[in-house]
Image (spheres, rainbow, N blue to C red):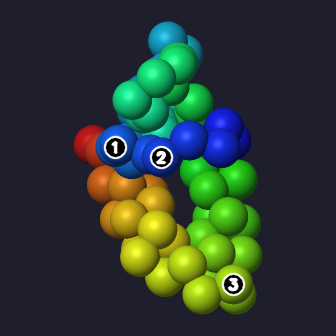
Amino acid sequence: MPDLPVLLIEPHRNHRGIWRIKFSYETGEPFSMAATQASIMVSRLHEIGEVELADEIDGAMRIATRYATM
């Protein structure tokens, strides 16, 4: 991930129809990752005390999971 402040973390469906987690930044291109990668990141963020960011990513993952089952 870029070392920039994240403006928005949201679920995002790619051109193949797969739900991913997208990180948008003030400058530069958005970055997206698979839900499995995001899940690992959430665990590691909790380990280092970054609870707010972990919770935001976790919320986006829950929404992506719900959308994927529709």
Q: Residue tagged by mark 2?
A: 5
Residues packed near mark 1 inside 10 Å, few (<14), some (14 to 19) or many (20 plus): few
* Mark 1 element type: strand
Amino acid under disc 2: Pro
Q: Are marks 2 and 1 in contact (CB under 8 Å)?
A: no
Give 35 or 67, whichever is nearer the viewer.
35
* CA distance for labels 2 and 1: 9 Å
x%, y% of residue 49?
60, 87
Residues packed near mark 3 inside 10 Å, few (<14), some (14 to 19) or many (20 plus): few
x%, y% of residue 23?
47, 39
Q: Is residue 43 above or below residue 19?
A: below
Q: Residue at x 50, y 72 (%)?
A: 54
Q: Residue at x 46, y 68 (%)?
A: 53
Q: Which mark is residue 48?
A: 3
Residues packed near mark 2 inside 10 Å, few (<14), some (14 to 19) or many (20 plus): few
* CA distance for labels 3 and 2: 18 Å
* Mark 2 element type: loop
Q: Are marks 1 and 3 in contact (CB under 8 Å)?
A: no
Amino acid under disc 1: Leu
Q: Residue tagged by mark 1?
A: 8
The N terminus lies in which quarter of the figure?
top right
Amino acid under disc 3: Ile
Give 69 or 35, whichever is nearer the viewer.
35
Q: Is residue 53 above or below residue 20?
A: below
